[in-house]
Every structure is written in C-alpha cells, then in structure tokens.
Amino acid sequence: MIDGAFPSSVRSAIVKKTCEKFGRMETQGVAAVDIVEGMIGSDARVLGAASLPFLADFSQDRELLFRING
C-alpha cells in the first residue's frame, strides 16, 4: 500500500511506476503482492507509526523493519 500526504495524482503515479518496476523483476519463488493506493492521506504516517508496537509485539520476526539488507 502506498499512501501519504501528497496529492492523489502523485500517489497514482508512484503506484503506477512501482507496478511497472515490480513487473520487470524476477519474482520466481516470491509470493505475489498487490501494489495499491491508500486512501488515508496525511494520516498515513501517524497510523503507520502507531502500528509499530503491534508489529514488534506480535510479529514472528521482530527485526523485520530494521534490517538494512532485506
């Protein structure tokens, strides 16, 4: 999901370009993903940050967000 505090036209362009780039990647063995536009807008950053404690407490891989090399 791609969202943020920018105009919907910018968000749409980012989603489109991301889909194009992802479509050219070798994805054998990788689970399929949907790249979609969010609808939260300027509150996306706040809600994403608020979800971090839940991810840290309930994720099987607690270091998931903090890896430098995937």
Image: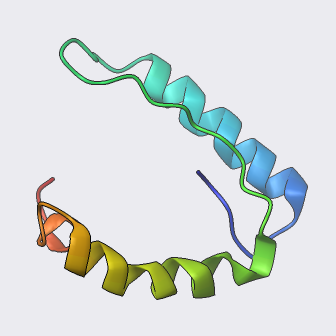
Q: Quadrant of residue 40?
A: bottom right
Q: Residue at x 87, y 65 (%)?
A: 7
**Of the pair 6 and 58, the residue shown nearer to us:** 58
Q: Position of residue 48 (x, y in %)?
A: 52, 77
Locate residue 15: give its quadrant.
Answer: top right
Q: Is residue 67 above or below residue 32?
A: below
| Vertical relation: 15 (above or below) 57 | above
Q: Position of residue 18 (x, y in %)?
A: 56, 38
Residue located farthest toward the front when viewing the structure as drawn = 58
| Residue drawn at x 66%, y 41% as measured from the top left | 36
Q: How is the image coloured?
A: rainbow
Q: Is residue 18 left or right of residue 43?
A: left
- Residue 42 is left or right of residue 29, and the answer is right
- Residue 19 against residue 46 in the figure, above or below: above
Coordinates of residue 39 in the picture (x, y in percent): 80, 60
At x 87% / y 57%, what residue is drawn? Answer: 8
How many discs appear? 0
User: Where 17 falls versus 68 (above or below)?
Assistant: above
* Between 51 and 20, the one nearer to me in the picture: 51
Residue at image location 68% in from the left, 62% down from the top: 3
Which of 56/65 is in front?
Answer: 56
Q: Is residue 4 left or right of residue 35?
A: right
Measured from the top left, where is residue 43 in percent x and y? 72, 82
